[in-house]
C-alpha cells in the first residue's frame, strides 16, 4: 500500500533529513514539502496526504495552528517533529500517531514509521481526525494562550486568512461556520460547537445554538416578552438571543 506523504518544517535541512530517511520505505511517497503552515494548508488541500511530518514550532503559524485551520475530516495521520518537554509530550503519547524529538535518531525514526503504518492500517480517517481533535483540545487546556488568532478560509485552490478581531459574528450553516466580516460572509468548514472552543470567551459569546457574537460589536439590547431578547450590532444587524443564552450574555457584557 502507498501512503502519500508531505514533510512540513521551516528548516530546509530538516525537511531533507526526513525525505532522506524515507528512501528505504518506498511505500511512503513524498508528494510535497513545505516551509510554513500556509503553504502546508494549500498542499494538503491539493494532495490529500495520508501522512504528514509536522514541525510543531514554526514562525507565524505553528503546527497546532495549522492543524486547527484544517477541516477535521481532512486531517491526515501526523508524526510530529518537536523539541517539547516531557510534560507536553504526554499529550502526544495519548493522542498522536507518533512524534520525533529533534535531533532525530535513526532507530527512533524506524519505530515511528512502523507505528504509523500500524495505526493507518487499523484506524479509519475519521478516527485519526478524532485523535487530533482530542490532542488539540488537550493542549488548549495546557496552554492558556490557545485561543485562535485567525482562520484559514479556502476559496478553490486559494487560501486566505481572516483574523478574529475582524469577525463581527458567526452563524452555523450545517457543518460550516459562516464568519461575517465587514459585510462579507466567509465559510469555514468547522461545526460551531468546535469553533466555539477555539474562541476567547472574553471576546466572543454564544447567544443562540446557531450564533456567536463578538461582544464589542453589540450596540443595543432589547428584552422580549418570552425572556428572549434582541441585540443590534454596530452595522445594524439584528440577532435573536435565546432565553437559554440570555443570562450568559448579560454576565459576559457586565464583565466586559
Image (cartoon, rainbow, N blue to C red):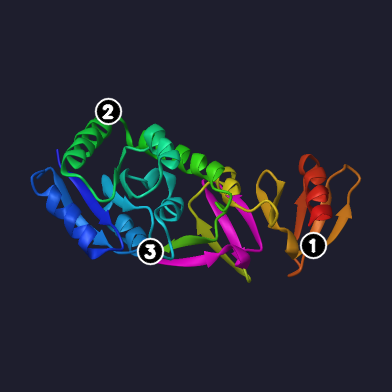
In the image, residue 135 lies in the stretch drawn in magenta = no
Q: CA distance from mark 2 to mark 3?
A: 30 Å
Q: Residues within 10 Å of mark 3 (few under 14, many from 20)?
A: some
Q: Would you name the residue on which mark 1 appears?
A: 232
Q: Which mark is residue 122?
A: 2
At x 74% / y 63%, what residue is drawn? 216
Decide if residue 130 is in sight here: no
Q: How many marks?
A: 3
Q: Which residue is mark 3?
A: 38
Q: State the residue at coordinates (81%, 53%).
A: 255
User: Looking at the image, is mark 3 or mark 1 earlier in the sequence?
Assistant: 3
Measuring from the top left, give residue 75's x and y in whole percent.
Answer: 37, 46
Task: Name which of mark 2 and mark 3 comes first in the sequence.
Answer: 3
> Between 38 and 92, which is closer to the camera in this rendering?
92
Instruction: Give the position of the N terminus as an image quadrant.
Output: top left
Rate crowding at label 1 as few (under 14), some (14 to 19) or many (20 or more) other CA atoms within 10 Å: some
- Mark 2 or 1, nearer chain start: 2
Magenta stretch contains residue 163: yes
Assign a secondary structure to mark 2.
helix
Q: What segment carries the magenta color?
A: 158-180
Residue drawn where x is 21% and y is 62% of the image: 13
- Regarding mark 3 in the picture, which secondary structure is present there? helix
Amino acid at each position: 500500500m502507498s501512503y502519500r506523504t508531505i514533510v512540513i518544517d521551516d528548516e530546509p535541512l530538516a525537511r531533507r533529513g526526513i525525505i532522506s530517511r524515507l528512501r528505504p520505505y518506498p511505500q511512503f511517497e513524498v508528494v510535497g514539502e513545505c516551509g510554513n503552515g500556509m503553504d502546508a494548508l494549500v498542499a494538503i488541500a491539493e494532495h490529500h496526504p495520508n501522512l504528514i511530518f509536522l514541525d510543531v514550532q514554526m514562525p507565524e503559524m505553528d503546527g497546532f495552528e495549522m492543524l486547527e485551520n484544517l477541516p477535521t475530516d481532512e486531517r491526515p495521520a501526523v508524526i510530529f517533529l518537536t523539541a517539547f518537554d516531557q510534560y507536553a509530550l504526554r499529550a502526544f503519547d495519548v493522542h498522536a500517531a507518533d512524534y520525533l524529538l529533534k535531533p532525530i535518531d535513526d532507530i527512533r525514526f524506524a519505530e515511528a514509521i512502523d507505528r504509523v503504518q500500524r495505526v493507518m492500517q487499523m484506524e479509519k480517517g475519521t478516527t485519526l481526525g478524532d485523535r487530533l481533535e482530542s490532542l488539540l483540545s488537550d493542549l488548549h487546556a495546557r496552554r492558556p494562550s490557545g485561543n485562535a488568532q485567525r482562520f484559514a478560509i479556502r476559496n478553490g485552490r486559494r487560501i486566505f486568512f481572516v483574523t478574529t478581531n475582524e469577525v463581527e459574528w458567526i452563524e452555523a450553516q450545517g457543518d460550516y461556520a459562516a464568519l461575517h466580516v465587514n459585510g462579507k460572509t466567509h465559510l469555514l468548514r468547522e461545526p460551531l460547537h468546535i469553533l466555539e472552543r477555539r474562541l476567547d470567551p472574553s471576546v466572543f459569546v454564544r447567544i443562540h445554538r446557531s450564533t456567536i457574537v463578538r461582544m464589542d460589536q453589540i450596540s443595543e439590547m432589547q428584552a422580549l416578552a418570552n425572556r428572549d431578547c434582541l441585540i443590534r450590532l454596530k452595522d445594524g444587524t439584528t440577532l435573536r438571543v435565546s432565553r437559554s443564552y440570555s443570562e450568559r450574555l448579560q454576565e459576559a457584557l457586565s464583565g466586559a
